[in-house]
Amino acid sequence: MPWRVHDVTVRIDPRVRHLVPHDSEAALFRFIQHRVGPGDVVLDVGSFLGVYAVLEAFRAGPAGRVVAFEPTAWSASVARHHIAFNTERAAPVTLVEAAVGDSVARTTFYEYDQPYVNSLAAAVDVDDPPTARPVDVVTIDDVCDRLNIIPTFIRMDVQGAEFHALRGARETIRRAGQRLTIVAEMHPQCWPSFGIRPDDARATIAALGLTAEPLESGTDLFDRDGHIVLRAAAA
């Protein structure tokens, strides 16, 4: 069915329309619309139902490319439908059904009735018990090398694993240099489960040669569920 996401119409599975808000994350939507353009190569890390991947594919156009990462089997199956429903005038989208981290592995993934909080660590603010299942973990460096791509834009929402995912993109970030913009959702409430403190987050950003600023001015860098923008530091 046609479904409005801000001022763009996408085609979605009507069974999940309650999970696709019309007007959420307005600042992130505007940023993607402004930053992603024809021919861009986009990584959508933590793609959930694939709606952002579709929006990015519209912006990148047939000359671009989108690679979406989603470890939850149910979410990935819905994302596949959404990608297939929205191919006209869009970039081709490759869906990688795996979690993203700092090393290639096979590990435990925690799934909930609220699927948008699924994570490589047990959620800290959900009362329902999770279902634990094994999942493959890939690195951005490994996938970019295998697909022979250098991204120009990365959107990331990985429920606390953001700095592990960034560490696994070290070579990609180096190769992309000033061409790359990263926007990542912050989940500091989840960081203790990943052994991350704010000082560790700042150290990782610096070690990767990046600068960081909040997506929305006047907010703290590591606001819960806020977004930060990462770019290569000036030489």
Image: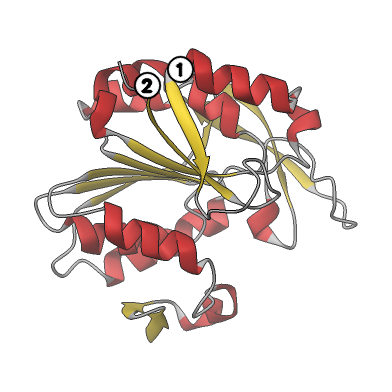
Where is residue 144, by image quadrant?
top left
Q: Please indicate whether residue 153 sits to the left or right of residue 132 in the image.
A: left
N-terminal of the pair, mark 2 or mark 1, is: 2
For this rendering, which residue is in front, 81 or 36?
Answer: 36
* Tag shown at residue 146: none
**Looking at the image, is 25 positioned above or below residue 207?**
below
For this rendering, which residue is in front, 108 or 124?
Answer: 124
Where is residue 37, by image quadrant?
bottom left
**Looking at the image, is 18 positioned above or below residue 153?**
below
- Residue occupying the point 50% across, 34% down: 212
Residue 81 in the image, given as x and y percentages of width and height? 37, 66
- Colour setting: secondary structure
Q: Provide the secondary structure element on which disc 2 rests.
A: helix
Whether residue 217 is visible, yes or no, is: yes
* Tag shown at residue 141: 2
Q: Which quadrant is the C terminus positioned in?
A: top left
Residue wearing tag 1: 208
Q: Please indicate whether residue 130 sits to the left or right of residue 46 in the image.
A: right
What amino acid is found at the position of numbered circle 1 in the picture?
Leu
Q: Which quadrant is the N terminus positioned in?
A: bottom left
